[in-house]
Image (cartoon, coloured by chain):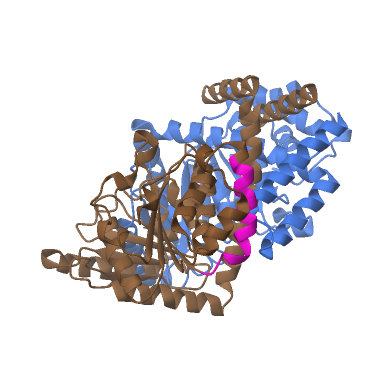
Chain colours: A brown, B blue
């Protein structure tokens, strides 16, 4: 499984979309890994090739359960994913883990540089771990990760885990691209949630209280009861599914099968009532529309003059000197004028 | 307070932005009401005049507390707002209530057609009730209501209540334009929340359990304890403020002063830690950016060819035949091509 650490430069490895697609459909991990690098690229030529590739593999995608997993640092996220992942491969699943790597943006390094992280799982031949670098925009993260999911599905992975960091905006983006959203929490005095942003709790289809072993077991059980009660008071999810709360110990390998059973029960339930497909269709339409907005926004910010106007307007809005409504009209009018001049 | 039922046609009453602004700054309710009609208008000429007016009154806006109030039908929302509003005017406040009227879209009628609704408050000379029609888009609602808030502030109202219906998307829009978001609930068997959309609970800065009188009193107190416990388990708000749960009876005039004290304490707390201004600035910037997106989206959908392309792409995405990423690029490219041809 050395593919994810070996990243050939694209110039040295320019392949056709067909070559990538064939490789992926033949479960070639090196090509899968390179294809993910391709969809992450910001070069226009790579983006066109990437779109061609996605179009080719599209009919072979979709046959997985997509699971988002979040939790604040300290909750034992990688430890849980490793134990849960090993359980999944032990029952014959093929697992891909897409980690949205918050550090890569700053250090240009990779989460896998830390060799202890999911070490055992990364050596499992039925698992594929791939850190997706957090691009500078939220849109960037979403865009790349959505395409990486499709590529992994085409390569035959039937469980896709998208990991996120639990403290930022990325949860909302990840929620918009997965079927099941799992929140990891630790038992404690009730303030363990301070790091979790408001709203994340209500996005969860399931909660797992981690580290339910040794001295922590009692606390974990108490937290389970508390959250189960709290979730009961809150509105039902759109799917009609009632979020469940479980406890788990990665050390004692407890709660891993229950976690999978919960996700499986969710899939059965939502497939039966039609929500599973409805949600995926809605997610795709949403992706389409937000992608249009992002592209146009990108076009606007490409022009130095407009970018300066946007920044100036923001400052005036901040100082209460300009109305957001009027300022936005000026930007859009300038944009269309500029386009007229260029063409 | 007949101003809100009397809506002169604009053609018969074309005023300059200065005339509107002067009238509003002189607390002229007829002109305030007409100005709100102006900002709700979709005619380009009205929009330009509206922007000019907003720019003029901008320095006189902002000096109010903006309160969003939501709750499902049956929770006694108008009864609560009427009792709470009467309390506010009794302590010397000047109150404007902007009701986002869900029915007006269908019936072209107005909430005030129902004369029993907030009847007493509507006759209070220190209160101004104005139903804002729910325009066809979410953006439309947000856009108009934001400007209506500014106009009411310029007219000297120091408490602005934005009422919403509690079952749809409008809550998110309203949350993005108020300082304090109040959720009304009724005590009961725990399933009273079925009508409230997930996520609304977590947006609340305060919860008021209504109808805490007679036979319902015990239930209301139980609900208060339950929600207080549940909110305690959930993450803190961004402001650091811990949402409070109160009970209230509009009939017995109980809990109205406590509600105001809660909102006042919130304002003091968030002003002190800087969040109050931060949130308003962030809301304005967000308004600016979403307004740019809306305007451009509007331009795209104005072209018949593009509108058809968007609809066709949506269908293909639904059928799994097109990738949202590639489809969005095609739309944006066609849009720019079309602009080139037109100019």
* Of A288 and A54, the residue lying toward us: A54
Q: Is residue A270 left or right of residue B268?
A: right
Residue B118 lies in the magenta stretch: no
Q: Main secondary structure of the magenta part?
A: helix
Instruction: Find residue A128 and report its horizontal and vertical position in percent.
Output: 39, 59
Tell me, yes or no, whether the highlighted magenta stretch contains residue A58: yes
Nearest the camera: B234 or B34? B234
Give the vertical position of B98 relative to B80 (above or below). above
Q: Quadrant of residue B228?
A: bottom left
- Residue at image position (58%, 54%) is A19
Image coords of residue B146 (percent x, y) = 61, 38
* Relative to B53, A105 lies left or right: left
Extent of the magenta region:
A46-63
Pick out the residue farthest to the front. Answer: A12
Relative image position of residue B241 (x, y in whole percent): 34, 44
- Give the quadrant of residue B188: bottom left
């Amino acid at each position: 499984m050395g593919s994810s650490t070996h990243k050939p430069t694209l110039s040295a490895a320019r392949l056709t979309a067909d070559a990538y697609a064939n490789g992926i459909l033949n479960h070639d991990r090196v090509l899968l890994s390179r294809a993910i690098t391709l969809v992450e690229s910001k070069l226009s030529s790579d983006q066109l090739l990437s779109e061609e590739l996605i179009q080719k593999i599209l009919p072979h995608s979709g046959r997985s359960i997509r699971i988002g997993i979040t939790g604040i640092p300290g909750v034992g996220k990688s430890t849980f994913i490793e134990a849960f992942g090993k359980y999944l491969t032990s029952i014959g699943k093929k697992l891909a883990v897409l980690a949205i790597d918050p550090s890569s943006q700053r250090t240009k390094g990779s989460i896998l540089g830390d060799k202890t992280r999911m070490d055992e799982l990364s050596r499992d031949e039925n698992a594929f771990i791939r850190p997706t670098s957090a691009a500078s925009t939220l849109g960037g993260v979403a865009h790349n990760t959505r395409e990486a999911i499709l590529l992994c599905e085409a390569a035959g992975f039937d469980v896709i885990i998208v990991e996120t960091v639990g403290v930022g905006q990325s949860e909302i983006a990840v929620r918009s691209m997965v079927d099941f959203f799992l929140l990891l929490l630790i038992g404690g005095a009730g303030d363990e949630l301070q790091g979790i942003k408001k709203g994340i709790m209500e996005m969860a289809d399931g909660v797992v209280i981690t580290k339910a072993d040794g001295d922590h077991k009692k606390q974990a059980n108490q937290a389970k009861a508390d959250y189960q009660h709290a979730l009961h008071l809150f509105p039902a999810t759109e799917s009609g599914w009632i979020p469940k709360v479980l406890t788990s110990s990665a050390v004692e390998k407890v709660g891993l099968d229950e976690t999978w059973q919960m996700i499986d029960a969710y899939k059965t339930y939502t497939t039966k009532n039609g929500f599973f497909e409805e949600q995926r269709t809605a997610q795709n339409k949403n992706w389409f529309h937000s992608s249009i907005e992002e592209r146009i926004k990108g076009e606007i910010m490409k022009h130095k003059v407009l970018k300066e106007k946007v920044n100036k307007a923001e400052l005036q809005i901040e100082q209460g000197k300009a109305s957001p409504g009027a300022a936005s009209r000026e930007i859009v009018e300038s944009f269309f004028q500029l386009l007229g001049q260029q063409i």
